[in-house]
Image (cartoon, grey):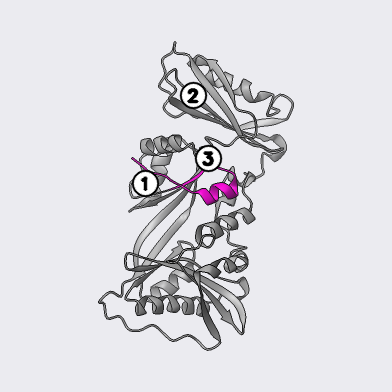
Amino acid sequence: MHEITHAPDETRVLGLEVGHLATSALSAEALAQALLAGRYDLCRVTVRADACIDAGVAALEAAAFPYCFAGAVLRFRRDHRGSGDEAPRTTPEGLEFHELPPDEHGSLKPLVRRCFADDPVGYHQTPHLAALVSKEAEIDCLLARHVGRENTQRRAVVVRAGGTDVGLIVMRPRDGILHVDLLGALSAHRYRGLYDAMRAYVHGVGYRHGMGDEHWVRYDDLLGLAGLQQDGLEHVATEAVFHVTPFLSHTVVQPRRILCVPQRVTVAFEEAIAHPCGLDRRRLVRRLVPSSLGLDVEDDERVSLVVRVPILTTALVLAVAEVVGDDGRSRGLMYAEYRTIDAEGDDEG
């Protein structure tokens, strides 16, 4: 069974029910049960395993929820515990590292916004979420996750060059390892030497406390990857990240409940959204054939169709119908996406 962790800060920021799941073996059935139990709109699923991308795609295709592959992360580690590793390098001239006390971590927020303003990865580039989540909201989630709450275990460091704040490091100890959660720099100062110096600082903190240090890098960040390998860190894990968007709670139109027989669920679904979504008066084309998840109902059984519309814009309509049996259990899900004819070639959403 999968246990999804509710993300209250991201839920508050995005206005969606958000959860996180990390697993080494993703199961389509267990994922479906967990998503339905938590009524999630969005779940960030991390699969840490050999062939993690293929394994994640196979399970998500079987689960039949809308999803997007958000990239792969490589984790590197250096273990100092009794290893006799040589001491870290000294800080280059002109750079200063200032560690903030826990009650001042909140002051990092403006610097985090500037360092990650052009970061291309996130919810805001996920199909469907792009219509709901802005880049600014994405950074708010980053702040809530790593800076927002006071945490005496977290260590936050400002990097300065010539008296100007140019970078930051957020890290936390766990199980004898110093894990780097955020490491970023202003775009004008992103050069190899600065990142080398920041990693050396983390190395020094871990070294003085008898801890190893763990860093992560996106698989397509060749500069970061080269730096970690040159520093002699060991590749310990590859993680595939997926954004799953079942939209089981969020709706911009009052949900509708319709009684029907299984043979009419698709027709009833389209009839239910035709007027509120303007399908009857707008030039729309359906781009996604409704799909189902485990529609195991008897032909003569009456079911309820609960219809929600999580996205309703001039260019995009996304509707979801949940088929509920007489016993109140969810029997299946159906999705329909419509785009205006004028936006058919548009990649938005």
**Pointers 2 and 3 in contact (CB under 8 A)?**
no
In the rendered structure, which amino acid carries the disc numbered 2?
Val
**Pointers 2 and 1 in contact (CB under 8 A)?**
no
The spot of residue 226 in percent (x, y) is: 44, 72
Q: Residue furthest top?
A: 300
In the rendered structure, which amino acid carries the disc numbered 1?
Ala
The residue range painted magenta reads 1-20
Q: Residues within 10 Å of mark 1 (few under 14, many from 20)?
A: some
Q: Residue at x 39, y 42 (%)?
A: 58
Q: CA distance from mark 1 to mark 3?
A: 22 Å
Residue marked by disc 1? 55
* Residue 143 seen in the figure: yes
Which mark is drawn over residue 41? 3
Q: Nearer the viewer, residue 86 or 287?
A: 86
Q: Residue at x 53, y 15 (%)?
A: 260
Q: Residue at x 30, y 75 (%)?
A: 80
Disc 1 element: helix
The spot of residue 111 in percent (x, y) is: 60, 69
Q: Residue furthest bottom?
A: 93
